[in-house]
């Protein structure tokens, strides 16, 4: 089975000012976001990626480029519209402080499966298309490169949260329990019987073990021995 690394884009100018950017064009990484994306790219440099797929929005494509810059050969990063941000409709471009006063805000927090954004998309539809896209790309990369293939999907907070909820077997109404920070790394492997979530919302730590994981593995009873410790420089 292949392994997908879910990366949220780095911090943007909209994030920093408390705006819900949605699908607004031209929203870029700010200085903090560029540093975050560069750090994530450096962290992933030890993993030979077979591909990087990105949301078409600029902030994700910028983040994907920081990852590609650290990879040998700098492969092309195709975009997939099914990984794009949720269509927040009339909420797009408004401040989070103002949106928190809306009656719908409470539903977003407690029953997202019932939410349809005014003039926009339902959160259930958002999850369905993003999960389908991740599983489709994962199967394609495994078919082409084998069960040890590792690839990256660069997307958005709510998209990644919904994918993780699906992998964890959680109802969409519980997905607000998951946090996904800017430029964070989450890791999922889709096995023949069930997905395995190896990490969520990490921004540090050794990932070299991903280069040595091959084939289907059952869950170790008792937790197993874990991954080998990273090699220390100069040792």
Image: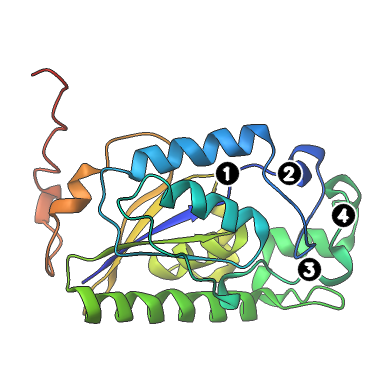
Q: Assess whether mark 1 and mark 2 are in contact (beta carbons under 8 angstroms).
A: yes
- The residue that appears at 29% across and 64% down in the rendered structure is 50
Asked if the residues shown at circle 4 and circle 2 are in contact, with their CB atoms under 8 angstroms apart, the answer is: no
Residue found at x 38% / y 38%: 42
Pointer 4 or 2: first along the chain? 2
In the picture, the quarter occupied by the C terminus is top left
Please state which of residues 3 and 180 is positioned toward the viewer in this rendering.
Answer: 3
Tell me which numbered mark, 1 or 4, is placed earlier along the sequence.
4
Crowding near the residue tagged with mark 4, few <14, some 14–19, many ≥20 C-alpha atoms within 10 Å: some
Q: Secondary structure at mark 2?
A: helix
First along the sequence among labels 2 and 1:
2
**Which residue is label 3 attached to?**
88
Q: CA distance from mark 2 to mark 1?
A: 9 Å
The answer to the question of whether label 3 and label 2 lie on touching residues, with beta carbons closer than 8 A, is: no
| Vertical position of residue 153 compared to residue 83: above or below | above
Q: Is residue 178 visible?
A: no
Residue 159 falls left or right of residue 195? right
Residue 15: mark in rendering: 2
Q: Which residue matches tag 4?
A: 99
Q: Which residue is mark 1?
A: 182
Q: Which mark is residue 58?
A: none
Q: Marks 1 and 4, Cα distance to the nearest angstrom? A: 21 Å
Secondary structure at numbered mark 1: loop
């Amino acid at each position: 089975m292949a392994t997908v690394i879910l990366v949220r884009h780095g911090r943007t100018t909209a994030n920093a000012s408390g705006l819900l950017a949605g699908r607004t064009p031209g929203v870029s990484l700010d200085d903090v976001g560029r540093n975050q994306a560069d750090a994530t790219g450096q962290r992933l440099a030890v993993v030979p990626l077979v591909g990087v797929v990105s949301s078409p929005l600029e902030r994700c494509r910028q983040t994907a480029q920081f990852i590609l810059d650290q990879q040998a050969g700098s492969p092309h990063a195709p975009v997939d519209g099914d990984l794009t941000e949720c269509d927040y409709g009339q909420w797009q471009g408004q401040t989070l402080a103002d949106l928190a006063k809306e009656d719908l805000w409470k539903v977003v927090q407690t029953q997202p499966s019932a939410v349809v954004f005014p003039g926009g998309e339902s959160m259930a539809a958002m999850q369905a298309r993003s999960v389908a896209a991740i599983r489709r790309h994962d199967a394609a990369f495994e078919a082409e490169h084998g069960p040890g293939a590792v690839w990256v999907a660069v997307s958005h907070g709510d998209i990644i949260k919904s994918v993780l909820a699906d992998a964890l077997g959680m109802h969409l109404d519980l997905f607000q329990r998951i946090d996904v920070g800017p430029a964070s790394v989450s890791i999922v492997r889709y096995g023949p019987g069930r997905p395995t979530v190896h990490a969520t919302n990490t921004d540090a730590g050794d990932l070299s073990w991903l280069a040595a994981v091959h084939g289907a593995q059952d869950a170790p009873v008792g937790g197993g021995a874990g991954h080998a410790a990273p090699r220390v420089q100069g040792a």
